[in-house]
Image (cartoon, coloured by chain):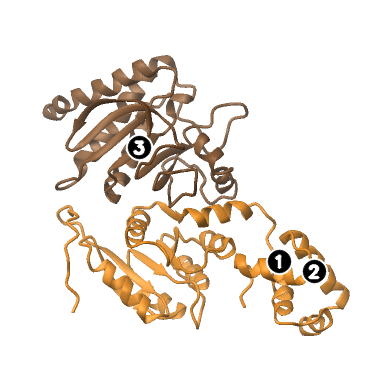
Chain colours: A orange, B brown
Amino acid sequence: MLTRVSSGRPQAPGTAPIRILLADDHMLLREGVRAVVSTQDDMEIVGEASGGAEAIEEYARLQPDLVLMDLQMADMSGLDAIRAIRADAPHARILVLTTYSGDGRAIKALRAGAMGYLLKASLRNQLLEAIRSVHHGGKHLDASVATAIALHVLDDDLTEREVSVLTLAAWGNSNKQIATRLDLSEETVKGHMKALFAKLGASDRTHAVTIAAKRGLIEL
Amino acid sequence: MSMEHSRSIGAWRGVSFAVAQIDVLKAEDDLLVVGMLERDVAGGPRGGADAVDDALHGTLSRLREGGIFSGGFGETMMLTRPPSPIRAATLMLIGMGASLSGNPEAVGNLTGLAMRAALRIGAASVGCLLGWSEFEVPDSLIAPSAAAMMRGALAAIDAQVGQMAAMQWTFDIRNGAAVRTTAALRNALAAWPRAMGAR
């Protein structure tokens, strides 16, 4: 049984705790976060979701003050869930809690409306600080993520087609096979490859796949 | 914490105030507060974020240019675990809007915002480089701006419910009017109990 230890953090009379919805497909992670949050007087987990679709439903049902959102979930990505929640609730406060430090996912999440981006490797206090900051309307980033974002935030984005081409290349498809799969000419695929090499600063397709995977620009 | 010529100017409810020329590369504070405008003025000062941005190879400028942090008035962003050479545990960026010139109360409001964040995270030491004084503040508004900053901080402290842990708060005074700024900060702090009593 968990023992509730008071944080000693005073609350103004009548101030309700921060109501948090936790969306992550790993139960162990959810239990860990719940244990950390349960030690604090000024916040509480009011609901959990194990996937993106469930997160959207639970947000609508519970109307929490803040969502802690994983990005990689089986049924629907956290990114799509963020977009859906913000489409219905433009002021929803969402803090991403993820293992991905690459700039690609972080930029997409922040542009989709997430107000914070924290790594699961963060310390307990950093999570609690981030929850409070975002709840009060501020943004919150792990500085290593901010640095990665800053390196590439002004770069040209890969187009959807370029992402499709590179993802197929990552799975070992030749240009001819990619062309067939995407119903394009082989010359067009080569053109996309050339463009994305330039955008990524890559010397060949292996290099391009490595860079894009590391930065979270493609899903493998 | 590493400060050049740090001088205490008093305390209020467990928060000890000092003034210093803060070296952002040496400061080991729990929280370093820097102000950023919405855009830089060509050839002009860039506020408290200038030295930090240089140390981080332009990260702050690019975050702003990329729309991740706009610098809009009152916008905040906390950056945890900043890389070397920054030694502070957390950086707090505060948007100062297009300009703070001639608006002491705005500077005070932003200082209050920073103090509330510091109290919220339980910071034991804070360096505040809002950078207001580097901008084209009319000479007649230097002291009122400094006083507003102190009042903003004190109001945030008074709004805090319950006991507070001890905190060391240092205002940066690298502004060419350090003596007047220090005097105004000290006077506003000294006058605060009377001001509260009069309400």
Q: In front: mark 2 or mark 1? A: 2
Whole-number angstrom distance, CA of label 2 to CA of label 1? 9 Å
Q: Are marks 1 and 3 on the same chain?
A: no
Q: In front: mark 1 or mark 3? A: 3
Please say if the residues under marks 2 and 1 sit with CB atoms less than 8 Å apart.
yes
Residue picked out by circle 1: A159
Q: Position of residue B131 (x, y in %)?
A: 44, 30
| Residue visible at 20% across and 57% down in the picture | A15
Q: Is residue A197 above or below residue B191?
A: below
Disc 1 residue type (three-letter): Thr
Q: Position of residue B92 (x, y in %)?
A: 41, 45
Residue picked out by circle 2: A192
Whole-number angstrom distance, CA of label 2 to CA of label 3? 52 Å
Tell me the SS state at disc 3: loop
Of residues A155 and B2, the one nearer the viewer is B2
Disc 2 residue type (three-letter): His
Q: Which mark is residue B1?
A: 3
Name the subunit of mark 1.
A
Of residues B165 and B109, the one nearer the viewer is B165
